[in-house]
Structure formats: C-alpha cells, structure tokens
C-alpha cells in the first residue's frame, strides 16, 4: 500500500513537471515588457480593439483572429466614413445599427501588433465580449499584442502577474 502511494506521488510529480514545460500558444498584451493581459490562444482565437477616433470623436473597432500563429485583421467597423478610410477593404461592406462594417479583410498582421493609446482614446481590448481597458486617462501608452508559444509554467506566471495589475 505504501509503495503504491509513493508510485502515485512520483507519477503525479512527473506529469506536473512535464506539463509545466509543455508549450502552449498564447496571446499576450504587454507594456514596458510587463504583462497586462494573457490568454490561451488556440487556432481561431479572436479579439477586437475599440477606441475613440481622435479626429472624428466616434468609436472605431477592428476585429482580429489568430490563424497559423499569426494575427489576421478580419473586419473593421466605424460610424463615419472620412479621409484616409479605405473604400475597398474587405470583400463586403454593409451598414448595421449605425455602424459601417467592412468584413472578410483577411490582412496578415503577423505575430505582433502594436497599439498606442492617447489621452482621450479610451482604448479597450475585447475578448469573449468582455472589455479589458487599455487606456489610462491622460496618458499615451504603447502596448505590444503578441501571439507566441510559451511553456505552460511561463504562461501561468504571466497570468498571475497580469491578475495583480
């Protein structure tokens, strides 16, 4: 009986150690090399970034999806169409609830996306419908959003740090 318990504890310890070093794909948001948010990011993981446009003072939102370890711009929506807005982004465009949507953009961003917030932009990161604030009132902050593979132990440590912020 005692031998079975020792074998069980040894087996659990080996599984835990092995799992700690097993790499998982994650989506992380950092500023000044400090974790702000981190999420497991399997194939098809999606998120959006919403902000108030500094000139038009209207909300804009861009929708992204993770494919093959890269960030892809999938769609965008905004309320006013002005100078600098591409007229032919995506495969389709339509109006819905006061928003102009451009969908099926399918533009490769790569493994990293940089976002710089402004004092009045109210940037938010949306994941699963939940708003995660990015902007700090009155501040300009640069964020790095990144998809990469990390050992589970590193992911868990970053997750703990991000929860304390």
Image: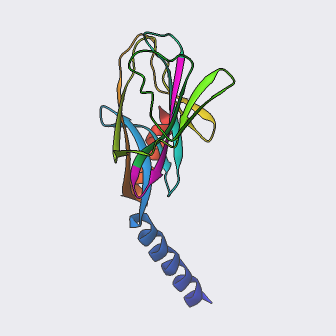
Is-magenta flag for residue 13? Answer: no
Looking at the image, residue 33 sits to the left or right of residue 49; the answer is left
The x, y position of residue 69, in whole percent, is 39, 55
Looking at the image, residue 100 sits to the left or right of residue 143; the answer is right
Residue at x 48%, y 69% (from the top left corner): 16
> Which is nearer the eye, 162 or 115?
115
Looking at the picture, does residue 21 appear above or below residue 121? below
**Outermost residue to the left:** 32
Looking at the image, residue 124 sits to the left or right of residue 151; the answer is right
Quadrant position of the N terminus in the picture? bottom right
The x, y position of residue 23, in whole percent, is 40, 63
Looking at the picture, does residue 94 appear above or below residue 154? above
> Which is nearer the eye, 135 or 83?
83
> Which is nearer the eye, 8 or 43?
43
> Which is nearer the eye, 146 or 9?
146
Is-magenta flag for residue 62? Answer: yes
User: Residue 99 is drawn in which quadrant?
Assistant: top right
Stretch of the chain drawn in magenta: 59-70
**Outermost residue to the right:** 97
Residue at x 44%, y 18% (from the top left corner): 136
């Amino acid at each position: 009986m005692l031998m079975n318990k020792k074998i069980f504890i040894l087996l659990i310890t080996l599984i835990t150690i092995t799992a700690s070093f097993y790499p998982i794909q994650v989506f992380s948001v950092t500023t000044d090399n400090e974790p702000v948010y981190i999420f497991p990011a399997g194939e098809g993981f999606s998120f959006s970034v919403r902000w108030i446009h500094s000139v038009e003072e209207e909300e804009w939102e861009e929708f992204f999806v993770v494919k093959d370890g890269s960030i892809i711009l999938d769609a965008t929506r905004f309320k006013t169409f002005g100078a600098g807005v591409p007229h032919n982004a995506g495969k389709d465009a339509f109006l819905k609830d006061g928003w102009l949507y451009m969908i099926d953009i399918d533009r490769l961003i790569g493994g990293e996306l940089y976002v710089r917030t402004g004092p009045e932009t109210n940037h938010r990161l949306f994941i699963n419908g939940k708003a995660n604030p990015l902007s700090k009132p009155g501040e300009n902050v640069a964020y790095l959003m990144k998809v990469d593979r990390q050992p589970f132990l590193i992911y868990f440590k970053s997750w703990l740090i991000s929860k304390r912020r």
